[in-house]
Amino acid sequence: MVQRQFPNPKELAQLMRFKAPTMNPTDRRLEHALTIADLRRIAHRRTPKAAFEYTEGAAEGEISLARARQAFQDIEFHPGILRNVADVDTSREALGGPSAFPFAIAPTGFTRLMQTEGEIAGAGAAGAAGIPFTLSTLGTTSIENVRAANPDGRLWFQLYVMRERERSYELVRRAAAAGFDTLHFTVDTPVAGARLRDKRNGFSIPPQLTPKTVLNAIPRPAWWINFLTTEPLTFASLSSTGGTVGELLDSAMDPTISFDDLEIIRGMWPGKLVVKGVQTLADAKILAGLGVDGIVLSNHGGRQLDRAPVPFELLPEVAREVGGDTEVLVDTGIMSGADIVAAVALGAKSTMVGRAYLYGLMAGGRRGVDKTIEILSNEIVRTMKLLEVRTLDELGPQHVTQLSRFTRVRPAVAAQAEAIAEAKPRTVRAPRTTAAAKPTTARAAKTAAATAAPAKTVAAKSATAKTAARTTASSAPGRTATKSTKPAVAKATAPDAAAPDAD
Ligand SMILES: Cc1cc2nc3c(=O)[nH]c(=O)nc-3n(C[C@H](O)[C@H](O)[C@H](O)COP(=O)(O)O)c2cc1C
């Protein structure tokens, strides 16, 4: 029988913990957000449908993005024990400079559409947190104003090489003059992906006021007040407007861009050069051979080629093969600090976050971006402690297993191709042997094409080898957690890369 008593007023008083209400409405909104998914929910409530869906959406059936997010969920962590993790160090050198955490803010176009503070909020928050911020060619704030918002921090510039080359070159020069330290040359956008949500929403630049948008605006007054009472929403570096983002991209982008453009940009840019949007091991090897400073394994957040490889799944093999010479970064699908820790464990030097940042921006402007960074960084620290590692360098493949949801069809043929590749001697040496002999990108690309051709011819001699090579090429980066039996290539070679399994 439970003995009952009257509540003791003293004990009752001790239990009462009334918190002073948070007066600032933005802070009040954000204080309940514990995860990026919580920020997304707030963003959804506050942002007009077309703007939210422009951010959230991906290309065609949005399969790439769904798979990328799933891949981060489909991992298993393997923690250590008894290692004293009272203090952990989350910082790391990436692309020649410090970063307080292993993530940077990814470049996003038309950012002031999401919330009027746009890039100013992103750059300011990144600067305060000690992580790099990347400004897009399609940004809505100028290079110089972004520098003013983050006077001492690290800034990266993302370049689209446009039909009007001189316009792109001018941006490169201005970014260098403003002290941006790294240039990300995006290469996955010869044409725009099919962003069907934008089409269905009739979303255009600038946004149009139609009866539907007005109706949608009624429960979201803050966004509209911001939109109508701040400087007009335009691209800072692009004059064309009118049409969907996809149509604008198609008119500005040049499908003829090639390795020659990479060489020209290399010649113009004094800082670190990174190629963003690498999606095969073969291309990673070519770029490593050409001596770029870094690559970003990315499928543009699923916004370009749908059903493209999942960058996180490419990561272990690419990091193993080219990570010694070239810094490998990864993006697409990152929604938590644990995702970032997993990527670092599997060989990423750093990562980039797109939507996670934009959800914060839409949820609360600058304070919202601060909140995104706070959530991700707390999750990184907690995950590192639970894994019992004190530094990012202690993280390794032993901490993460990628679980397999799918296996590739015809694995036996792929294995056969791999056996053929193993048996063949590698005849072509790396083009980059000494500093003096460092090839220009165009020259090396031509060498790659020329030397790849005989390799293909050899492969063509045998029908089996031909089929096998095709199968392996299409299945090289595994969705399964299988381990490659190929020895790592000491120096990446363009010819190997151009015909990875037929040489
Ligand atoms: C709204 C939006 C706009 C983007 N604009 C650009 C851009 O202008 N240039 C670029 O290289 N990548 C752009 N990206 C791709 C991001 O840089 C990054 O690769 C992607 O967002 C990573 O995936 P995540 O959103 O799942 O983090 C954009 C992504 C989003 C969501």
Image: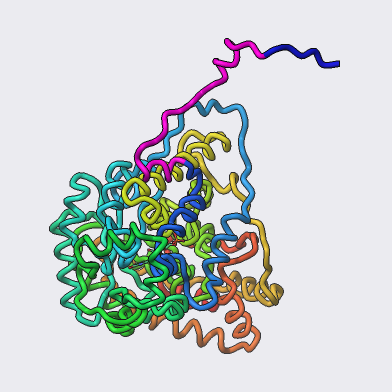
Residue 112: say if magenta: no
Total labels: the figure holds 0
* Camera-nearest residue between 291 and 67: 67
Can I make out residue 285 in this image? no
Q: With respect to residue 258, does 331 lie above or below?
A: above
Q: Residue at x 47, y 71 (%)?
A: 58
Residue 255 higher or lower than 294, as above or below: below
Q: Is residue 116 left or right of residue 480?
A: left
Q: Is residue 257 left or right of residue 501?
A: left
Going 53% across and 72% down the picture, which residue do you hit? Answer: 62
User: Percent position (x, y) of residue 85?
Assistant: 52, 29
Of all residues, the one furthest to the front in this rendering is 6
- Up/down of 426 relative to 104, above or below: below
Q: Residue 451, position in %: x, y?
A: 41, 80
Image: magenta residue range: 7-31
Q: Quadrant of the N terminus?
A: top right
Ligand 1 placement by image quarter: bottom left
Report whether residue 240 is seen.
yes
Q: Nearer the viewer, residue 249 or 429?
A: 249
Q: Quadrant of residue 25?
A: top left
